[in-house]
Amino acid sequence: LVTERSYFDAYNKKRKYQGDVTGESLSLDHDFGTVSDVDAGFENKSDLQRRLKPRHLQMIAIGGVIGTGLFLGTGSDLAHGGPAGLLIGYCVMASLLFSVMVALGEMISHLPIAGGQFALASRFVSPAVGFGMGWLYWYNYIVVLPAELSASAVLVSYWTPAGKADSTCTTGICNNSLWIAIFLIVVIAINFGGTRVFGEIEFWFCSIKVLTIIGLIITGIIITSGGGPDGTPIGFRYWNQSGGFVQYQDIPGAKGRFLGFFSVLINAAFAFIGTEITAITAAECANPRRAVPTAIKSVWIRLVLFYLCSAFIIGLLVSPSDPDLNLGTGAAKSPFVLAMKNAGISVLPSVVNAALLTSAWSAGCADLFVSSRALYGLASRGQAPAIFRKVRKDGLPWVCVLCGSVFALISFMAGASGKAGTVFGYFSNMTAICGMISWACILWTSIRWQKGLKAQGIDRNTLPYKAPFQPYLSYYGLTVSILVMIFGGFTAFMPHFKASSFVTTYFPIPFFLVLSIGYAIY
């Protein structure tokens, strides 16, 4: 607890004398005002500027990275796990994410520092873990951006001849690279517009997502109740097939059903990952100690309304045996769009597909934003080349944004191969395991944080935000994330070993270990 004791000693001293963190009053009752930075003797001063408003942070927390993981990835989850497996898998992931967010919220609302969660890991676990986590986090969002861009090309194919399973279209409009280039240019332009531009655009993008999801849920209820053009109620038709589960790889009995459910977990992780970007954006929020707790408390809206309700409705509307759910066919569609098309609704599917496309666009913007801030956070602590500390006059870390933009070019793999859906699957697998490692580290950090508070006799009721059910919730989340991390890639071994799937799924684990151990030795 050396690091913890050093920090908390400084913290207690500031509380005792009502000292100031960066020139502003820090009172005993934690009536925190706006701060420009947090410095307890460990952190280099950040050159980022707090230009995000509380409404930006709250909306980003609710829908900032909701994208193709929910709108497109749920299709393959349904095909593998069935409606029951899909819903149970999403419930497990929702409980895991809740444990992560409340734990992170307690720490970051008190310490809204550049680098977010990996800066906290450096402080309360070890610099080596923080170093490995920081670079893994950067790698995660460098990879997830191409995933969103690839999936965007899949969504566009709904309107092109390439969206037909038997299509031999060779015209430019069917070229995935064309659409990926257009989306990437817009994402880069928004990020170079600065934090305030990003925050405002994301606010409206997220608002569209929220309205879209609410509209989809209502429409889904109407269709399944028989309110569609054909007037045929669906009800629990697909739940009554094999008890709502799919026999994974045609494996009979309970084993096949369990594997179908478990296969959902790693894919569901991709859909859930990103909510924790609240910690990264807190370093650029005007009033983090007030805004972060409010944003954290709204996470249940995202979990229950967006994910669980959506998963339940999708399981009612679409058959898990529908071939258009397969990402590898090149004709994959969002299950929401597919449900409307199957119900005989002619115009609305295109409108919804366009809204889903803006969601992927929005998530891509958030991905580039987070990767650039992660890299800046590493550089600000001397764990990345100093050139990445360069910022514009408005506080934009332009070198970091440029670096992320260059790496985003790997998304053109989807254009070169002509199989955007398959490439999306590879990228999402890599991202999911990265997310599990990051979540495990956040929960580990939270456990250490709890021990530090107890060792120093600090009452958690005096913190800006107090996480519920601690430390037990953190232990639960840590256990689940480790299990998913280790066993989530079982699909690489069934029905036979697939090297490409194994590498894309498990590469982040040795990557993190090599970075952390190497830093500790060095």
Image (cartoon, rainbow, N blue to C red):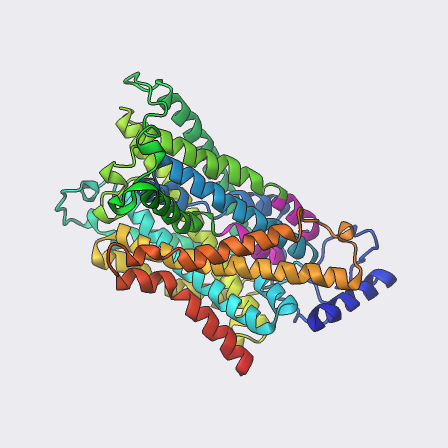
Residue sitting at 36 percent across and 49 percent down? 263
Q: Nearer the viewer, residue 513 or 411?
A: 513
Report if residue 487 lies within the magenta region. Answer: no
Q: Is residue 217 above or below residue 156?
A: above
Asked if residue 375 shows in the view, the reply is yes
Tell me the chief SS of the magenta region.
helix
Q: Is residue 110 above or below residue 356?
A: below
Q: Nearer the viewer, residue 244 or 61?
A: 244
Quarter holding residue 406:
bottom left
Magenta residues (range): 274-296
Residue closest to the far front: 253
Residue sitting at 33 percent across and 28 percent down? 240
Report if residue 285 lies within the magenta region. Answer: yes
Name the spot of residue 26 as percent of width and height, x first: 80, 57
Taking the image as shown, residue 411 lies to the left or right of residue 284, namely: left
Asked if residue 351 shows in the view, the reply is no
Numbered marks: total: 0
Residue closest to the far top: 231
Name the spot of residue 297 as percent of width and height, x first: 63, 42
Taking the image as shown, residue 219 lies to the left or right of residue 423, namely: right
Name the spot of residue 372 as percent of width and height, x first: 49, 63
Name the spot of residue 138 as percent of width and height, x first: 47, 64
Q: Nearer the viewer, residue 193 or 429?
A: 429
Taking the image as shown, residue 1 lies to the left or right of residue 484, namely: right
Residue closest to the far right: 17
Taking the image as shown, residue 166 lies to the left or right of residue 330, namely: left
Q: Nearer the viewer, residue 188 or 483?
A: 483
Quadrant of the rendering where the N terminus is positioned? bottom right
